[in-house]
Amino acid sequence: MTSSKPDLSATMDLVADVEGWMSPGQGATLYDAAERCPDDGLIVEIGSFRGRSTIVLATASDPSVRVVAIDPHAGNDRGPQEIDGFVEEAADDNTVFNTNLADAGVAERVEHIREFSDTAFGMVDGPVDVLYIDGAHRYAPALADIQSWGDRVGDRGTMLIHDSFSSIGVTLAILRSLVFGSRFRYVGRSRSMTIYRADLGGGIGARLRNAARQLAELPWFAKNVALKVILTAKGGMLWKLAGRPEPEWPY
C-alpha cells in the first residue's frame, strides 16, 4: 500500500457530496474489502450509479489493483422505486459519474464498462478478488449476478451484496443461491450490505450453521419490507403528524 493513500475518514469526505445509497458503515465495509484486495488483484462493482461506492473502492485499493465498474446507465434499476423510464436521467448519471471520479482523483484507476452485467461478463478476464453487487434488484437479474459473477470470485475472495434482506428480489436470490450453498461463508452485514467470503468449509455442519446465521436475518427483512410498504403508501406522513421525522428508505 502507498503511504499517501487516503484513510477511511478522508475517503468518506471525498464522497460526502456524491449522491448514492451508502451509509458511513457501508462505506467502511467497502473500504476494508478493497484494502484487503491483494496486489495486482481485481475488484468488480456491478451498479455504480454516480460513483459514490466506486470512489471508495478505487481509493482504498492498492494502485496495482484493477477496478472495474459495470453500469449501463440505461435508465432502468436506477434507484428505489425507479425501475424503468429514466433514460434522460441516465445520460446525466453517466456524466456526473465521470465528473465525480475525476474530482476524486480516481478516474484513471477505474475502468467503466457501460453495459449490463451479463454482457460485461465476457469483457472482464480473470478471477475476481472483491465483487460488489448493487445492480438490478429484481429476482432474476440479482440471482444471475450472484451466481454467474459469484462463480468468478476466487477462493477466499470477498463478495458484498447491497440491499440484502431489504429488497425482496435480492433476498429471494440470496435464499436460492447462498443460504444453503457450499462455498460462501456469511460474515455479517452493515445495514443491508452483506459480506460473504469464499472460504466455507467443514462439511454439512458448517453449511447448516452458515444457513442459520443468514435465516436469522429474516425478521429484520420483514421489518424492512413493512417499512417500505408504509412509505410507498405515503404512511410516512403519519410520522410527520406525530412530530417525528419520516424514516429514510431502508438500505
Image (cartoon, helix red, strand yellow):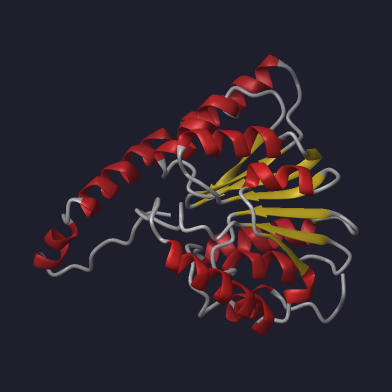
Image quadrant where residue 97 sits = bottom right
Q: Is residue 69 above or below residue 58?
A: above
Q: Residue furthest bottom?
A: 103
Q: Position of residue 128 (x, y in %)?
A: 79, 46
Q: Is residue 197 visible?
A: yes
Q: Position of residue 237 (x, y in %)?
A: 14, 62
Q: Position of residue 121 (x, y in %)?
A: 72, 43
Q: Is residue 94 left or right of residue 10?
A: left
Q: Is residue 178 left or right of residue 221?
A: right
Q: Position of residue 182 (x, y in %)?
A: 69, 23
Which residue appears at 43% of the width and 54% of the height? 251
Q: Residue furthest top?
A: 204
Q: Is residue 230 left or right of residue 224?
A: left
Q: Quadrant of the N terminus?
A: bottom right
Q: Is residue 16 above or below residue 239?
A: below
Front position in the image: 151 or 25: 151
Image quadrant where residue 100 sits = bottom right
Q: Is residue 39 left or right of residue 77?
A: right
Which residue appears at 78% of the width and 70% of the height? 109
Q: Is residue 214 visible?
A: no
Which residue appears at 46% of the width and 58% of the height? 75
Front position in the image: 202 or 132: 132
Which residue appears at 62% of the width and 39% of the height? 145
